[in-house]
């Protein structure tokens, strides 16, 4: 499902579990290890070439844990956010 929204946003867990979830290719909940996940796309806008950008919200159907990722269809990576660099 896609919804047009007013702006890109972040919601849910934005900490280390978000990046553990990303490592599973957004398929396994980092809290309960289940694969029953729902995602909802919120489209901020669309460029003249048809590329969209916005936010995708992921929610675990089992434990209700959730997070979000910013996306851009024109980007080198669809989900362009990267985990924070670890301190030496």
Image: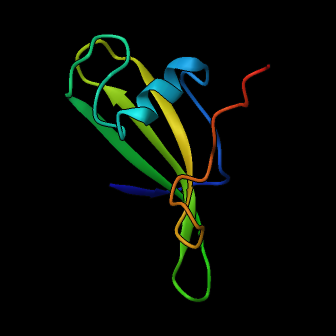
Location of residue 77 by image quarter: bottom right
Q: Quadrant of the N terminus?
A: bottom left
Q: How is the image coloured?
A: rainbow
Location of residue 6 by image quarter: bottom right
Q: Residue furthest bottom?
A: 49
Image coordinates of residue 64 in percent, x first then y, are: 34, 17
In the image, what residue occupies the spot 79% across and 20% down? 87
Label total for image: 0
Q: Between 52 and 16, which is closer to the camera in this rendering?
A: 16
Image coordinates of residue 80 in percent, x first then y, are: 60, 53
Left or right of 11, for residue 35: left
In the image, what residue occupies the spot 52% across and 29% down? 19
Image coordinates of residue 63 in percent, x first then y, are: 30, 12
Measured along the vertical axis of the image, is residue 78 above or below residue 52?
above
In the image, what residue occupies the spot 61% across and 20% down? 15
Location of residue 26 by image quarter: top left
Image coordinates of residue 83 in percent, x first then y, are: 63, 34
Measured along the vertical axis of the image, is residue 59 above or below residue 64?
below
In the image, what residue occupies the spot 58% across and 73% down? 74
């Amino acid at each position: 499902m896609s919804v047009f929204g007013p702006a890109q946003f972040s919601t849910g867990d934005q900490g280390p579990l978000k990046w553990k979830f990303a490592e599973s290719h957004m398929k396994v909940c980092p809290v309960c290890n289940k694969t029953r996940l729902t995602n909802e796309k919120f489209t901020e806008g669309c460029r003249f070439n048809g590329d969209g950008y916005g936010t995708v919200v992921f929610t675990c159907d089992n434990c209700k844990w959730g997070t979000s990722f910013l996306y851009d269809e024109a980007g080198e990576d669809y989900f362009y956010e990267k985990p924070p660099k670890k301190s030496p």
